[in-house]
Amino acid sequence: MHPDKDARGSAYAVHVSPPRCGICFHVSEFLSISNQMAVRRGSLGGLNGFVCMATYLQTVDVGHFVTADVHQALTREVRRGLIARPRSLSPWMFYDAEGSRLFDRITTLPEYYPTRTERTILSGHADAIIAAAHSDRSSPLRIAELGAGTASKTCILLEAALRLSDEVVYMPVDICSHALELARQNVTSALPEVRVQPIVRNYVTHPLQLEPFDGTTLALYIGTNIGNFSPERARLILRDLRVQLRTGDALLLGTDMVIDEPTLLPAYDDGDGVSAAFNLNILHRLNREPGADFDADRFHHRVLWNSVESRIEMHLESTQEQDVSIEHADLALHFVPHETIHTENSYKFTDQGIRSLLKEVGFEIRRAWKDSRGWYTVTLACFR
Ligand code: AVJ
């Protein structure tokens, strides 16, 4: 069966897991969304840690899938977060096509050091990192990346992977299909030997399910993406990942460290206002998608360092008293002056924090790499 192609002429694999939270699809619903798709039932036996869970590897028309799934998730999240006090929204909502584009601009800002710092570490140690994760050149290497975005730094590791393994498979996982399309293009044009299998997925609500693989799997969770989650949620995400791995597989974790506040703050509040635009884009997105009528000029981007929780917080602050309605979520909201919507946490780590987090979820640190200033750490971990 040939998969339907989306507007940009590409097809993606979407792994469908059994319902785990509210945003779930059953295969029958998928069939009604896209009637031209390949459905292949995965094996029941080979999935470490998942008892009696069938996986379905489906190649679907991503445009349709994402529209239906994300629309439902947005509405649900808006009802949860904007009614609650204090109001909040989940950071995954930043990443529509425009938000992914703004985030890529953030990563090039002089104030935003994490991306650049991580890239320096990866460039300097790519061979050592891959060699530490995968010692047998004759066996295939699969690299699965959570929150891959446009995969701008991953090529450094994939190049090293091609030097150290005869067969390399790359599975970028991201909530944004537009970013994944760019990731696929970046990787296939730079490294045509790598087999790319993008997966559109909210890995928090729908943990990744890996097909059995005859080789080594390296899970990548870089870009300090884990910083978006509370310690409790971070542990859940890493546990979900760990049960997908087998002995000999590894995890590469990238984490931004606690540094001085005068350096931290501008990384989230730059002079050109790109971070502000990124934060405010969530309101524009709600106007575009669930039919809200936010006036983004009446909200300000606010950033603070919460030293107790060890995290940067981003908020949107209402500059005045105002009413907002969100049509498709059936919501009428009233904001008082200075009322805030908490849109993001970005946790910063310490060596001790990384050690205990990985230990608690059953990983053992094999090696870690840092930049010369100690602002960022890349940690390679395997099973304990
Ligand atoms: C993608 C979660 C790593 O927290 O630094 C950048 C997102 N938010 N500027 C971060 C972000 C505002 C970024 N992560």
Image: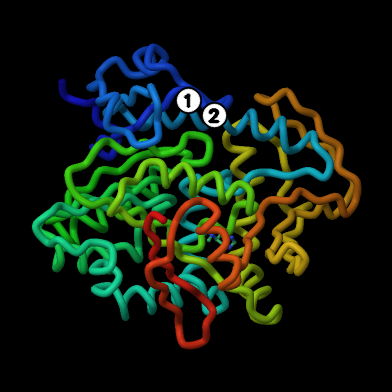
| Quarter placement of the N terminus | top left
Q: Position of residue 15 (x, y in %)?
A: 35, 31
Q: 335 left or right of 115? A: right
- Which residue corresponds to the image point at 70% horizontal and 78% vertical from the top-left? 261
Viewer-proximal residue among 228 and 182: 228
Nearest the viewer among 175 and 6 is: 175
Other-residue count near label 2 (Cα within 10 Å), few / some / many at <14 / 14–19 / ≥20: some
Q: Does any portion of residue 280 appear in the rendered image?
A: no
Q: Secondary structure at mark 1?
A: helix
Task: Specify the amino acid type for callout 2.
Answer: His
Horizontal and vertical percent position of residue 77: 65, 34
Q: Residues within 10 Å of mark 1 (few under 14, many from 20)?
A: some
Report the image quarter containing ligand 1.
bottom right
Which residue occupies 54% across, 73% down? 112
> In terms of image quadrants, where is residue 364?
bottom left
2 and 1 marks in contact (CB < 8 Å): yes
Q: Which residue is mark 2?
A: 71
Question: What residue is pinned by disc 1?
Answer: 68
Mark 2 → mark 1, Cα distance in angstroms: 5 Å
Please determine whether, in this image, residue 12 is positioned above or below residue 143: above
161 relative position to 363: left or right = left
Please tell me in which quadrant of the rendered image residue 63 appears.
top left
